[in-house]
Image: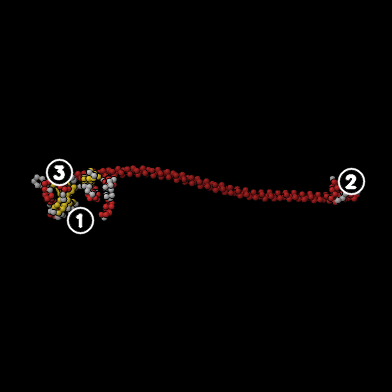
Amino acid sequence: MAHMAQNQASRKKGKKVTIENFYGGSTQGKEENEEEIQKNSEHASQNGNYQQALEDLKLELIQKMETFWKEKWEKEISCLTDKTAQLEKELEASNRRADKAEKQIQSLMTRIKDLEESEMIKQQESIKQTQIINEGEENRKYLTEKVTDLENRGRRENLRIIGLPEKPEVNNKLDFILEEIIKENCPHVLEQGGKIEIERIHRTPSILNPQKTTPRNVIAKFKSFQVKEKILQEAKKKSFRYKGAPIRITHDLAANTLRDRKAWNTIFRKARELGLQPRINYPAKLTIYFQGKVWAFNKIEDFQAFAKKRPELCGKFDIQAQKARET
């Protein structure tokens, strides 16, 4: 190996290599070879030191890198551990809040269910109460009609005289005044003997209201329904008078019946203008003569529905418009 190194060194220096100097054939060649070998040995020693230093540097760098990444990852892991713990705490708190919210929702659902059941019970009670009220209203209406009918039947022998002057000499002798009225307007109705049997006769109301200027009505109760009807029929045919002053004689009806009859006034006047021959029959029924037939109506709504379906009458019985024009 030393000879090969010597040979290579000779070639680099440009010297001619021979067998003698290659194998140490001369002293000079041997010295040169020894020097060359020493230099090469020093150079190899230096190269070995460099390699060792490089290895040490690599090892140190690796150790520093390991230390750096270990510390970094330890910090990262510690940070992640803290965050995980924090997240676990937050998750636990969130679960507690969710459980609390779930309990509140269940409580609210229970309350809503109770309220719905309570509301359903109230609705059922309200329906029952409404039914009871409706039944009571129907019973009240039925009883009112029955009482009104009984009251009217109790007045069937009565006549109401309207417009008789309010004077003491008249009020003290109402029975004689009635006979004079009959003699003046329908003398043929008088019974044999020229007298009418009257059960009672009086002013109504019993107390005079000084604020009213019109005289109070007079109620006369006859003992005979037939005589009363004869006088009433004569009063429908012509206007009655007392000593030349006009008076009216009508049925004596209950207040409810009079109110129901009064409700027909506007329609009655318009029907009379149109030549429909209106009449108010007992208790408060309107009849008209239209297109060759007699039509009867118990309610204003029924008559209005009838008029709307007839072109000849449609729009002519608008009660609100007529009242507005009258006002």
The numbered disc on residue 103 is none
Q: Tell which circle, 2 or 3, labels the residue nearer the N-terminal end.
A: 2
Cα distance, mark 3 to mark 1? 34 Å
The numbered disc on residue 19 is 2
The picture places residue 224, in percent across and down from the top left corner, at 14, 44
Circle 2 crowding by C-alpha within 10 Å: few under 14, some 14–19, many from 20? few
Quadrant hosting residue 115:
top left
Residue position marked by numbered label 3 in the rendering:
226
What amino acid is labelled 3 in the image? Gln
Residue position marked by numbered label 1 in the rendering:
212
Q: Are marks 2 and 1 in contact (CB under 8 Å)?
A: no
Discs 3/1, front: 3
Cα distance, mark 2 to mark 3? 187 Å
Q: Secondary structure at mark 3?
A: helix
The picture places residue 282, in percent across and down from the top left corner, at 21, 45
Cα distance, mark 2 to mark 1? 176 Å
Foreground of the two, 161 or 168: 161
What amino acid is labelled 1 in the image? Lys
Q: Quadrant of the N terminus?
A: top right
Foreground of the two, 57 or 326: 326
